[in-house]
Image: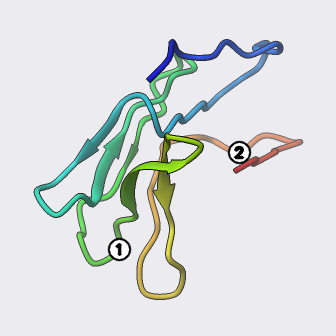
């Protein structure tokens, strides 16, 4: 994989998750923790494997993706306090 990207705008950034960086998986390949790359320490975690998304290496232009399969699985929790406005881009 190449070097980590840098964001053009970082002021006020509270959370930055990259599938290529800071992802911890269990032996089944399910994401149990995802380290916040913004420097704010708002790491995302999931202790319940029935709810964890999966890490898929090389899935998008040879880059990793975190797969959130929907209704039965695919959530992570983060300690972010919501402020207005809140934007989520995936």
Q: Judge from the rendering whether residue 50 lies leftward or rightward of residue 70; answer left or right.
A: left
Vertical side of 32 occupied by 71: above or below: below
SS state under label 2? loop
Q: Secondary structure at mark 1?
A: loop
Q: Which mark is residue 82?
A: 2
Q: How is the image coloured?
A: rainbow
Q: Quadrant of the N terminus?
A: top left
Q: Residue at x 37, y 54 (%)?
A: 55
Q: How many marks?
A: 2
- Residue lying farthest to the left in this orientation: 27
How many other residues sit within 10 Å of disc 2, few (<14), some (14-19) or many (≥20)? Answer: few
Residue at mark 2 to residue at mark 1: CA–CA distance: 22 Å
Locate residue 9, reporting x and y percent: 82, 15
Q: Which residue is mark 1?
A: 51
In percent of width and height, residue 38 lies at 57, 20
| Residue 59 in the image, given as x and y percentages of width and height | 49, 53
Q: Earlier in the sequence, mark 2 or mark 1?
A: 1
Is there a contact, CB below 8 Å, between mark 2 and mark 1?
no
In this view, the residue farthest toward the bottom is: 71
Residue drawn at 48 percent across, 32 percent down: 42
Q: Residue visible at 36% across and 30% down?
A: 22
């Amino acid at each position: 994989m190449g070097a980590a990207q840098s964001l053009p705008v970082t002021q006020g950034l509270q959370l930055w998750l990259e599938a290529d960086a800071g992802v911890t998986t269990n032996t089944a390949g399910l994401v149990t923790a995802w380290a916040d790359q913004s420097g704010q320490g708002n790491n995302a975690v999931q202790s319940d494997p029935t709810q964890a998304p999966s890490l898929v290496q090389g899935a998008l232009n040879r880059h990793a993706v975190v797969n959130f399969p929907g209704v039965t699985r695919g959530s992570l929790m983060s300690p972010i306090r919501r402020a207005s406005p809140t934007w989520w881009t995936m």
